[in-house]
Amino acid sequence: MTDPLLQIYLMACMVVAMAILVFWGQFRKRLKLSAHESPDKLINYKRIKRVSSVFWIIFSLFGIMIIIYCVAPDLYFLFVPLDAFHHPLINNIGLLITKLAIAWIIVAQIHIDKELFKYSRDIESLSAMELVSYSEGMLLSGMLVLFLGIFTTITNVVGVILTVIGVLFFVKGKIYKAYYLS
């Protein structure tokens, strides 16, 4: 079952999330959020490469899922939809979670910019780099909330599996950092 209004909102949310995740540096340049030179250039920071490739793969698969849901709903059966959860209240809660995730990702990107600026001023500081790493964790958790929101909006078996894989890799990364960096 597909809902035309839900299709439009989901596609719009995915395009906005992708634009924020992939093109944040260009947005910063165009909007002139800061009078200073980009700290990304000063310390050769590759924002996109810092996000785990597993999260990019999951993000891409959710993107494909949304494109199929919106453009070719006849093929949506490939993701094994759970029609029992296709209810307007559940769909609206999922969209709300997705919008919250987009706001979370924007805050995380701004936070990364702030911490990179501090780090670029004192490049020898280990605590500044730890704050950058913490901010990257905020970005990953925002992506995880985005996965949860999409999964809640269009509930299907593949979405459940992708979200669980995302949670496992996020927790694994936190455990790894806590164990090896303490």
Image (cartoon, rainbow, N blue to C red):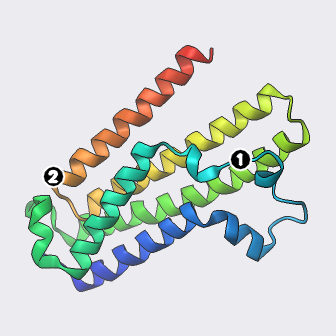
> Residue 176, percent across and down?
50, 22
Question: For the C terminus, which image quadrant?
Answer: top right
Of marks 2 and 1, the one in the foreground: 1
| Residue found at x 42% / y 77% | 12
Query: Residue 82's image quarter?
Result: bottom left
Classify residue 169 as left or right of residue 165.
right
Query: Residue 178's image quarter?
Result: top right
| Residue found at x 20% / y 59% | 155
Q: Which mark is residue 17?
A: none
Q: Which mark is residue 45?
A: 1
The amino acid beneath tag 1 is Tyr
User: Does residue 55 lie above or below 128 as drawn?
Assistant: below
| Residue found at x 35% / y 73% | 10
> Residue 107, percent across and down?
63, 56
> Residue 119, percent across and down?
82, 40
For the residues labelled 2 and 1, the Cα–Cα distance comes to: 37 Å
Classify residue 87 as left or right of residue 23.
left
Classify residue 73 as left or right of residue 110.
left
> Residue 156, percent across and down?
17, 57
Front residue of 83 and 46: 46
Mark 1 closeness class: few <14, some 14–19, many ≥20 residues within 10 Å = few
- Residue furthest to the bottom in view is 4
User: Does residue 145 lie above or below 70 as drawn?
Assistant: above
Which residue position holds label 2?
A: 157
